Amino acid sequence: MNAVDMDIDYDASEESSFFCLPEELNCRLDQTINDNDIVKMSAAYQKCISYSWREFAELHLKISHGVVENIVADQEGRSLRIREMFRRWKESNPDGKTPNDLIEILDNARLVGIKQHWFSDYIPNKRALDKFIDDRVTEFGRKAELNFNPEQFTKFLYKLGVQDKEDFVKTRSPNNIFKQRLDILHIWENRVGFMEATLEKLNQCIEEVLVPNERGEPLRQLTNEESANRRPFMVRPTAGSRISVCQGCRQKFDHMHDRLVVAHWEEVTYKNREGLVVNEWTNGHYHLSMDCIRVKWQNFQGKLNAVKGVLFSKEKKFLRKKGFELEKLYG
Ligand SMILES: [Zn+2]
C-alpha cells in the first residue's frame, strides 16, 4: 500500500446515491428544463474543470461560432459564460429543451462525470459529496506530481484510455506539465464517470508504469532493467521494417523467409554505420524461435503478445507449433 492511498472515507453506497438519476429529474425527463436546471448544469460543468467550454458549445450544443464569440464578449468570467452557453442552447428551441436532451448530449460527448455531477446537484445533503470531490482533487494533485518520464506517461494514458487527449492538454498548458497531467486526470474522470474512475483503478495503472521504492518514498521511475523485465514479447511482421540482426543467434534476418519476428524492449547491442559496437535501450528483435530468445532471456516461457489483426489463423497455428502461446492481443 502506498502512502498516497490513504484518507478516503466514503463508502460505495454513499457514492452511488450521489451519482444516479435523482427522482426529481426522473419524473420530468420530457418536460422543459427551467432556469434552476441551467444553474445546476452550469455548476456541474464548471466543477469538471478540464473541458474547454467553447469546444463543447460548438461541437455538442451546436451553438455557432459567432454566438460563442458573443458570449465571450458579453459575459465576464468563466462561470457566467458557461451559464450563458446553456441558456442560449435552451433557447435555441422555441419549445425549450428537456433533461433528456441534456442527458443525450452529455452521453454523446462522453461526459459521464459532468452528468453525474449534475445529478448530484439534486441531492439535498451534499456535504459528503463535497468531501469526496475535495479528496479526489487532492489525490489527483499528488498523482500529477509523480515522476513519469514522457514515454511512461503516454503508456499510463493508454491504460486510462485518454491517450487521444494528450496533445489537447499539451496545447492548452504548453509550459506546465503539472497542469497538463492534472487536466488529463479530470478528463479521464469525466469520460468514465466517478463510479468507474476509482482511485484504486488509478493506482493500479500507475503501478503498472511506476514502482514504489522500499523506503515508502514517492513512486520512482522504473530502471531500464526493470522496465525491460515487464515488457511483453511482441510478435510482429518484418515487412516494411529495417531490422537486421537477431539479438539471440546474431544472424541476419531473411525478410523473405522470416515473415514474423519477436520484438522486445531491452538493451540492444549492434554495430553502427561507422562499424562501432553500440549499446542502446530500444526494441531488440529475435527469430521466431524459443532458442534465440532464451540466449538472452533464459526464463522466457513462450508467452507472446500481438497487435490485433497482424496474425492470420495459419500463423497462430505456426506459433503454437513452435512452442509459443499467444497471451494478449492489443486493440
Ligand atoms: Zn536468431
Image (cartoon, rainbow, N blue to C red):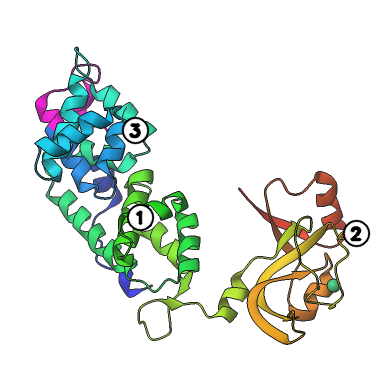
Measure the alpha-carbon separation of dots 3 and 1: 19 Å
Q: Quadrant of the N terminus?
A: bottom left
Which is nearer the eye, 52 or 142? 52
Does residue 237 appear left or right of residue 58 in this picture? right
Q: Mark 3 and mark 2 in contact? Answer it, CB < 8 Å.
A: no
Of badges 2 and 1, the one in the foreground is: 1
Mark 3 or mark 2: which comes first in sequence?
Answer: 3
Residue 33 lies in magenta, yes or no?
yes
Q: Which residue is mark 1?
A: 171
User: From the Cβ of disc 3, is ligand 1 less than 8 Å away?
Assistant: no
User: Callout 2, which amino acid?
Assistant: His
Q: Secondary structure at mark 3?
A: helix
Question: Position of 71 compared to 8: left or right?
Answer: left
Q: Percent from the top left, x then y, of residue 148?
A: 42, 71
The amino acid at mark 1 is Thr
The magenta-colored residue range is 21-38
Asked if the residue at tag 1 contacts the one at tag 3, i.e. Cβ–Cβ closer than 8 Å, the answer is no
Camera-side residue of 280 and 122: 280
Q: Which mark is residue 59?
A: 3
Image coordinates of residue 196 in percent, x first then y, are 38, 48
